[in-house]
């Protein structure tokens, strides 16, 4: 059974890895776990430690210590591979060290070209793929002078943040100081992108690459919330294939070929405009927002296990056909929660698989400005089509009444 060093392996990954023949040595940052899991982080890491061969804890922001932890874990275990399919922010250094040791699953170049929004845009421009007008600024104060090269509105975004944090539609320069405040609250000081505003339905393409061959697991339809933020209010998986979704999927595969991606999952977001599909961004990991879970409900396919099969050189694909899987997110008025009703009635519905509302009276419901500030979700199963799935989601939302002050 080969040894595998994984950075940020989620608990759900560990049993899947063993089932595909891998022993996992886990590397985690307690601060990153706290960001993801809050007060439950210590217990989460304890469970990871129990499921893995061993657990190493290190501060991902301390580059020297982080790199040495990877080297030491490989040295101690004789691992054949180092793999990081967690948060993009800590991914690049892991691949650089793995490449130095000769145990990288993917090249550092391919990973940065997928994860870094500026690097990806530059590559696509240079190769003439999915051309989107863009410009780069070092500070938000420098963006106003770039607007003359665009038709308003434009999309502005940090080049190196995930989960829609700091991404918004900008209708004019008067909105820049507010965006600057948002970036300051995120403690972000890296490059900023100004992009033309792409109009049209948005999708994500879920792929699994095995030995350099890219396999499309399916196309997810993204349902967006209100502007100016680009926060998904839901995802639908399992709709019938169309010429549009085939074009969207083909473009994602073209991107993966262009970056030289060799193994594992990727999640590529695409908008189908009047001029054809255009790439929004991509990540060298599974889709977030529990997309693997709704694929499982729609197709009975274990995406997380398939990831480790891919590492072992085996191709595993979902069967076509089946119901539509849907996750719908909640976004209530912000404020201090006074009361909530209807949760039990919603959970009792036979098509509700999971419903999460992680707030109690007295808690603050934040304004929904990123995927990190939504107010819970419901996973719906067994819907015959997208219309039925969305109608069911609307019914669940209508059952839940929230009072804030």
Image (cartoon, rainbow, N blue to C red):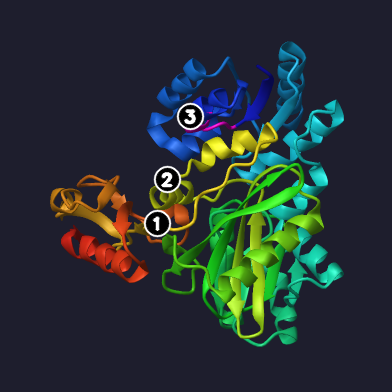
Closer to us: 376 or 337: 376
Q: Does the magenta run of residues contain 9?
A: yes
Instruction: Judge the density around disc 2: few (<14), some (14-19), many (≥20) Cα neighbours within 10 Å.
Output: some
Relative placement, left or right, of 143 versus 13 is right
Q: Name the secondary structure under disc 3.
A: helix
What is the number of the mark on residue 11?
Answer: 3
Residues shaded magenta: 8-13
Residue 207: percent from the left, percent from the top? 62, 52
Q: Which residue is mark 2?
A: 300
Decide which of tag 2 and tag 1 comes sooner along the chain: 2
SS category of the residue bearing label 2: loop
Q: CA distance from mark 3 to mark 2?
A: 20 Å
Q: Secondary structure at mark 1?
A: loop
Residue 306 is one of the magenta-drawn residues: no
The residue drawn where x is 44% and y is 65% is: 239
Contact between labelled residues 1 and 2, with CB atoms less than 8 Å apart: yes
Q: Residue 300's x, y, as percent?
A: 42, 45
Vertical placement of residue 158 versus 128, above or below: above
Q: Looking at the image, can residue 178 be seen? A: no
The x and y percentages for residue 368 are 40, 61
Numbered label attached to residue 322: 1
Q: Residue at x 81, y 65 (%)?
A: 122
């Amino acid at each position: 059974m080969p040894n595998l060093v994984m950075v940020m392996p989620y608990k759900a990954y560990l049993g899947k890895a063993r089932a595909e023949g891998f022993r996992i040595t886990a590397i985690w940052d307690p601060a990153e776990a706290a960001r993801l899991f809050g007060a439950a982080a210590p217990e989460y890491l304890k469970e990871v430690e129990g499921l893995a061969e061993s657990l190493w804890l290190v501060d991902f922001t301390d580059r020297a210590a982080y790199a040495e932890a990877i080297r030491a874990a490989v040295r101690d275990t004789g691992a054949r591979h180092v793999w990081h399919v967690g948060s993009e922010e800590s991914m690049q250094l892991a691949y650089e060290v793995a490449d130095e040791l000769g145990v990288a699953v993917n090249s550092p170049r391919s990973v940065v070209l997928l994860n870094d929004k500026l690097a990806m845009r530059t590559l696509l421009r240079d190769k003439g793929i999915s051309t989107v007008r863009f410009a780069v600024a070092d500070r938000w104060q420098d963006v106003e002078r770039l607007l003359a090269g665009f038709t308003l509105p434009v999309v502005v975004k940090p080049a190196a943040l995930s989960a829609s944090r700091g991404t918004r539609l900008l209708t004019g320069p008067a909105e820049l100081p507010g965006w600057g405040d948002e970036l300051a609250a995120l403690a972000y000081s890296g490059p900023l992108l100004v992009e033309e505003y792409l109009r049209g339905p948005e999708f994500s393409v879920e792929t699994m690459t095995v030995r350099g061959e890219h396999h499309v697991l399916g196309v997810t339809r993204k349902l967006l919330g209100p502007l100016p933020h680009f926060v998904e209010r839901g995802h639908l998986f399992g709709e019938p294939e169309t010429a549009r979704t085939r074009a969207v999927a083909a473009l994602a595969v073209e991107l993966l070929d262009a970056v030289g991606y060799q193994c594992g999952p990727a999640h590529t977001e695409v908008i189908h405009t009047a001029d054809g599909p255009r790439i929004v961004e991509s990540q060298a990991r599974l889709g977030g927002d529990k997309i693997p879970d709704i694929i499982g409900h729609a197709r009975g396919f274990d995406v997380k296990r398939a990831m480790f099969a891919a590492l072992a050189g085996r191709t595993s694909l979902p069967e076509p056909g089946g119901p539509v899987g849907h996750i719908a997110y909640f976004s209530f008025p912000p404020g201090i929660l006074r009361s909530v009703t209807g949760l039990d009635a919603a959970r009792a519905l036979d098509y509700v698989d999971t419903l999460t509302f992680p707030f109690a009276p007295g808690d603050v419901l934040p304004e929904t400005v990123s995927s990190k500030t939504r107010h819970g979700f419901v996973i719906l199963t067994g819907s015959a089509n997208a219309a039925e799935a969305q109608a069911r989601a609307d019914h669940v939302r209508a059952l839940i009444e929230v009072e804030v002050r």
